[in-house]
Image (cartoon, helix red, strand yellow):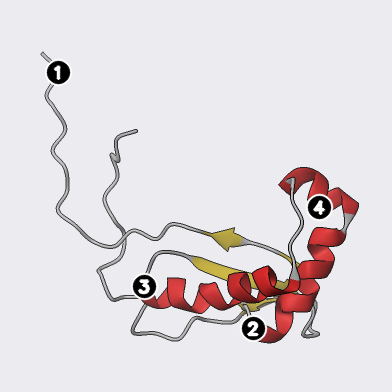
Amino acid sequence: MPDLVGAALTAGSLARREQPVLTVAELTLRPWLNADAPAVVGAYDDPDISFWHGRSMAEDEAADWVGSWSQRWLQETGAGWAVTDGTLAPRSRPTWRVVQTCRRPRRRPRSS
């Protein structure tokens, strides 16, 4: 599928900043922490979540997954936040996997 929209951020825009913590009302979105791995395992053990994901996650896999998000932010290849209710325990898994940085705009072919 062709990419018809150019990047919105200049390369390095994310990597040079600390990943933000966002708070709205009683919910806080924060970067994943290594201490979140057991909560991720517990979430994947939940039958309703595993039904949609079609898999489970072992402790070592969860630790690798949680740890990968800080590298994705630094490499500008993705961003992920744990949703919490003011406690440290994650409540959900919003994750955006693709972050495009600036590059030359593509020219669209002219229609005849």
The earlier-in-sequence mark between 1 and 4 is 4
Q: Can I make out residue 6 in this image?
A: yes
Percent position (x, y) of residue 10?
A: 25, 68
Q: Do the numbered discs 3 and 1 sit on residues whose CB atoms are within 8 Å?
A: no
Q: CA distance from mark 2 to mark 1?
A: 50 Å
| Circle nearer the N terminus (3, 1) | 3
**Relative horizontal placement of residue 54, taking residue 71 as reference (left or right):** right
Q: Secondary structure at mark 2?
A: loop
Is 87 situated left or right of 109 in this image? right
Q: Which residue is mark 3?
A: 75
Q: Residues within 10 Å of mark 3 (few under 14, many from 20)?
A: some
Distance between the alpha carbons at the discs numbered 3 and 4 = 29 Å
Which residue does the image show at 87% across and 49% down from the upper left? 48
* Dot 2 amino acid type: Leu
The location of residue 26, given as percent across then percent down, is 79, 77
- Image quadrant assignment for residue 107: top left
Q: CA distance from mark 3 to mark 1?
A: 37 Å
Asked whether the beta carbons under mark 2 and mark 1 sit within 8 Å of each other, the answer is no
Amino acid type, label 4: Ile
Task: Tell me the quadrant of the picture where the C terminus can be found.
Answer: top left
